């Protein structure tokens, strides 16, 4: 319990840092409308203006990218790694330095080929098109894995064939076809298994037994197992390089209030023998019973988050930092993209945060790292995923601008 | 340079699309061919969608006062064949990004569509307003359903087009640019959809 509380304290500090104390005002009591599954519907004129903010389909031209708006800590530097990568989402690094990039609103998967010489631009190639929400990418032993909404493909020997990609092999399609939270982040764990999340098919509902979970399987799609249950929608995860525990981000439900529930960071022990249940739809953020589904249940039944990440902040991609370029205080810390809120009057997120852990894997602190995507309650850009390059610099994908940023450090 | 993988979808021959467009749009038949400007293409667009912003053709949406960003997104989806609807994929083939932007601006400047259909009786009105409130239609589409940015105007839209769209979102046959409408319609009953379509079509 102590470690959890410290995690929450770190998150609360973050909220104050990033919102000027908005979270400190506390959550307003939810309105009373217990008969509705959409309990908490706002009636005020301000609330009815809230709407999802979809990124444009056309990438921002290089010359108009808002690089001057972005801020990183002293000693770090931001530059454009690639532009013209429409709706750039999840990223993975190939053995030869190719960065593979999925998209969610478009139908494309891209390969960003490193510059031939220092200072020269990278090259962006479309390596697959005609896909449905190809948000998820993974790379293993020369092969690229691409997750559409309900199908996962493998492209063998991809880096040798970027201009003529091989016909992909279908490895798994026993997946729901719901659009809501249907796009996927995928990854291959230290156990050489493919991890596949399946989101709740709506904001707040009783999910079928096939949804609101994370599965893992052999790389050929066989031997499917449940890893975690009661997960509303995870769009990012990675494994602690020391403990091998799985850490994943989760997006909390909408429309309860401006300030609750918060998005969460969760952990599944590498030694877990049964899949933990993280509470959806009964319990949110580990301590808030759902206004409708929570009656008769208790949050103490469920696995607790390791950190709260801000209400509606849309925590997405995350990676443990194992490079040598950044100062040693960042070693084995988590870099996490917060895409930014829509279900909140004063937007929250739109940044990269760094989550530093203690030796036992609990959260020591959550701090802003790359900011400026959100300015005057409007987006200059929206970060989706992070990916370390071999030199230790950190890439950040931005689906608003269709661009990839590179953050480096020089002493 | 951009390569394309094996999953890339081939686009239908442009000639087929142009033939269809010419058949539908008489006056454009005098245009010489493929390298048309947006100004040259617009009469063909509006031949179906309605030169005054109101479509008279079943199944063809009215575009008057449609937010430019919404039009841009849909034209992009048609061009890239992410949304497949004849003849729109052929119509959008070959358009440049700037063409898409210009078309969006032109369509947005048309007059709003003229609402159609009889006003709802008191009982139906009460029922549909409860649905609109519960599912927060106005949160995104605005209180007057005029839309904004990438969210379409739905006030005064053709009733059968609205119904087809709502059903498409609900059964996932129309994925939408993002998943918002798929998510919203999961909570609606099949019987709610005709009522919503009727209400919005006559909304004034």
Image (tube, coloured by chain):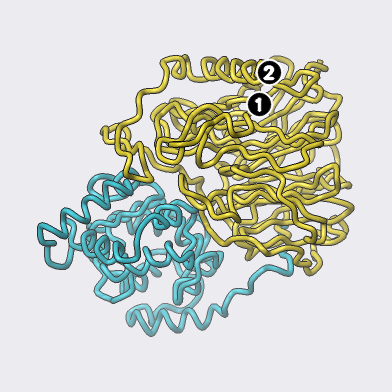
Chain colours: A yellow, B cyan
Instruction: Give the residue pinned by disc 1.
Output: A306
Q: Chain of mark 1?
A: A
Question: Is any atom of residue A131 visible in this view?
Answer: yes
Q: Position of residue A49 (x, y in %)?
A: 33, 38
Q: Position of residue B77 (x, y in %)?
A: 51, 62
Residue at x 70%, y 31% (from the top left corner): A79
Q: Is residue A341 left or right of residue B114?
A: right
Q: Position of residue B52 (x, y in %)?
A: 23, 65
Give the Cα distance between marks 2 and 1.
8 Å
Q: Secondary structure at mark 1?
A: loop
Q: Chain of mark 2?
A: A
Q: Secondary structure at mark 2?
A: helix
Q: Are marks 2 and 1 in contact (CB under 8 Å)?
A: yes
Instruction: Give the residue pinned by disc 2.
Output: A3
Q: Earlier in the sequence, mark 2 or mark 1?
A: 2
Q: Residue furthest front?
A: A296
Location of residue A204 with respect to A389 vertically, above or below = below
């Amino acid at each position: 319990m102590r470690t959890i509380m410290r995690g929450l304290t770190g998150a609360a500090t973050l909220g104050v840092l990033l919102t000027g104390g908005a979270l400190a005002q506390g959550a307003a009591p939810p309105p009373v409308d217990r008969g509705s599954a959409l309990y908490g519907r706002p009636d005020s004129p301000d609330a009815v203006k809230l709407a999802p903010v979809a990124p444009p389909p056309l990438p921002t031209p290089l010359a108009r990218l808002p690089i001057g708006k972005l801020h990183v800590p002293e000693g770090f530097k931001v530059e454009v790694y690639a532009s013209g990568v429409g709706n750039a989402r999840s990223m993975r690094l190939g053995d030869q330095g190719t960065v593979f990039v999925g998209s969610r609103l478009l139908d494309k998967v891209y390969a960003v080929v490193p510059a031939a010489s220092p200072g020269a631009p990278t090259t962006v190639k479309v390596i697959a098109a005609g896909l449905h929400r190809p948000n998820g990418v993974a790379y293993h032993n020369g092969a690229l894995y691409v997750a559409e909404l309900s199908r996962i493909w493998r492209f063998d020997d991809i880096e040798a064939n970027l201009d003529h990609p091989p016909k992909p092999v279908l490895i798994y399609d026993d997946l729901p076809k719901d659009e809501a939270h249907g796009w996927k982040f995928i990854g291959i764990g230290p156990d050489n298994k493919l991890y596949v999340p399946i989101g709740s098919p709506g904001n707040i509902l009783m999910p079928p037994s096939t949804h609101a979970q994370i599965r893992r399987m052999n790389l050929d799609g066989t031997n499917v197992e449940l890893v975690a249950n009661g997960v509303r929608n995870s769009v990012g995860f990675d494994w602690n390089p020391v403990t091998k525990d799985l850490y994943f981000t989760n997006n909390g439900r909408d429309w309860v209030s401006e300030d609750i529930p918060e998005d969460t960071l969760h952990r599944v022990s590498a030694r877990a023998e049964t899949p933990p249940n993280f509470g959806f739809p009964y319990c949110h953020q580990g301590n808030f019973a759902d206004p409708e589904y929570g009656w008769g249940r208790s949050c103490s039944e469920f696995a607790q988050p390791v950190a709260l990440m801000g209400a509606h902040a849309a925590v997405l991609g995350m990676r443990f930092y194992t490079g040598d370029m950044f100062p040693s205080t960042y070693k084995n810390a988590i870099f996490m993209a917060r895409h930014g809120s829509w279900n909140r009057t004063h937007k929250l997120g739109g940044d990269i945060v760094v989550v530093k852990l203690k030796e036992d894997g609990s959260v020591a602190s959550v701090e802003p790292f790359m900011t400026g995507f959100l300015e005057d309650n409007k987006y200059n850009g929206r970060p989706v995923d992070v990916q370390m390059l071999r030199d230790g610099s950190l890439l950040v994908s931005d689906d608003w601008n269709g661009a990839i940023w590179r953050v480096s450090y020089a002493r | 340079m951009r390569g394309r993988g094996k999953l890339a979808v081939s686009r239908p021959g442009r000639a087929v699309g142009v033939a269809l467009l010419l058949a539908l749009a008489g006056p454009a038949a005098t245009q010489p061919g493929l390298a048309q400007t947006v100004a040259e293409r617009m009469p063909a667009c509006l031949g179906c969608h309605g030169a005054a912003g109101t479509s008279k053709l079943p199944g063809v949406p009215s575009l008057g006062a449609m937010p430019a960003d919404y039009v841009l997104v849909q034209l992009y989806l048609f061009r890239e064949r992410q949304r497949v609807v004849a003849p729109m994929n052929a119509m959008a083939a070959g358009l440049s990004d700037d063409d898409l932007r210009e078309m969006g601006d032109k369509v947005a400047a048309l007059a709003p569509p003229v609402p159609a259909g009889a006003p709802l009786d008191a009982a139906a009105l009460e029922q549909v307003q409860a649905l609109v409130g519960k599912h927060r239609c106005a949160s995104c589409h605005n209180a007057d359903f005029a839309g904004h940015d990438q969210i379409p105007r739905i006030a005064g839209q053709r009733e059968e087009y609205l119904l087809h769209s709502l059903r498409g979102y609900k059964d996932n046959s129309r994925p939408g640019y993002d998943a918002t409408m798929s998510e919203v319609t999961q909570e609606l009953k099949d019987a709610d959809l005709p009522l919503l379509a009727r209400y919005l079509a006559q909304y004034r």
